[in-house]
Image (cartoon, rainbow, N blue to C red):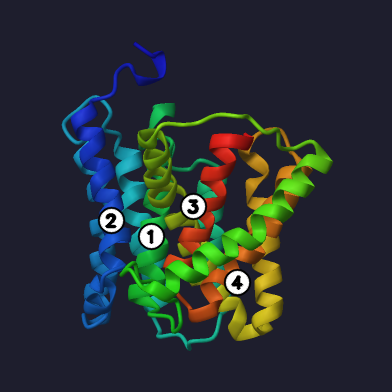
Amino acid sequence: MNLALSGINFSRAFAAFACLLAPLWFFGFGAAEALTALGPKAKVVGAGVLAIPYLVFALGTPDYNVRAAVIVIALPVLLAAFLELPKLPQRMTWRDAAVLAIVVASYFLKWLQGAWPNPALALLPKLFLADIVAYCFLVIRNIDGAGYSLAPRRSAVIVGFRECVFYLPIALILGELTGFVHFHAALPSFGKVLAAIIVTSLLVALPEELFFRAVLQNLFETRLGKTAALLVTSVLFGISHFNHAAFNWRYVLLASIAGVFYGRAWRKDRQILAAIITHTGVDVVWSLWFR
């Protein structure tokens, strides 16, 4: 058995994963709008429900950690209260920036590592933070124009694939010139391609596009305008990829340019699904043939 997987209760880990994915999925089909009808106190206290995935995973097992439990319960509640009381305008405020900065710090400084300490479960803290962002900005702030809908639409599919087609030649040319990508001739099975699409769209593109496009670029537009918001968000998106390995400027550059096309896909009709399709297409092509 792979040592990284040893000691994991797979049934609990899968249940926690399903609970973490549930808000991101159901919010995409109208659940967030329904929750905005709750009173301010109910919405703030309700943020504590986001801790359920950790309790499902750890409660009653040796993995349970009181400090981790306090963090996963308190973090969403405190951030929700910070944004709810008093009510904020639709424009980006310093409190929006502070909440997003705390989420970013939590991720890069691994403040939640104690909740899911096994390296094989490193994806779970990322999904937990995505849940917090979704709840804080789609339910508590209820920001305009997020376009966070996963309902399939023809326009989203067309725009998503279009931006992917626009970006891929640029990525391949720059990647070859900088030595970042290397073509691998292969004919992956249908199962491998399908698995790559599902995993990438749900676990990479969905949480990242929620954060960078539906929330960050959306809020920046209220202060900077559409073009500047697109460029600033794209650069931040690129910089966020510095930690995938020792700092690689080629990776950051290509990710920044990719962010422009992901942002264009979202901005065209303000549909998060379009950005997810573009992001998924780029990452799947890279992982299967150019990694």
Q: CA distance from mark 4 to mark 1?
A: 25 Å
Quadrant that contains the C terminus: top right
Which residue in the protein does label 4 denote?
264
In the image, what residue occupies the spot 33% across and 16% down? 6
Sort mark 3 into few (<14), some (14-19) or many (20+) by Cα contacts within 10 Å: many
Asked if disc 1 and disc 2 are in contact, CB closer than 8 Å, the reply is yes
Residue 238 seen by the camera:
no
Sort mark 2 into few (<14), some (14-19) or many (20+) by Cα contacts within 10 Å: many
Taking the image as shown, residue 241 lies to the left or right of residue 208, namely: right
Question: Tag 3, which secondary structure?
Answer: helix
Q: Earlier in the sequence, mark 3 or mark 4?
A: 4
Which residue in the protein does label 2 denote?
50
Q: CA distance from mark 4 to mark 2?
A: 31 Å
Q: CA distance from mark 3 to mark 2?
A: 26 Å
Which residue in the protein does label 3 denote?
280
Q: Nearer the viewer, mark 4 or mark 2?
A: 4
The x and y percentages for residue 63 are: 28, 28
**Most distant residue in the left direction:** 60
Which residue in the protein does label 1 denote?
132
Rendering quarter of residue 55: top left
Q: Earlier in the sequence, mark 1 or mark 2?
A: 2
Under mark 4, the amino acid is: Arg
Q: Earlier in the sequence, mark 3 or mark 2?
A: 2
Asked if disc 1 and disc 3 are in contact, CB closer than 8 Å, the reply is no
Under mark 1, the amino acid is: Ile
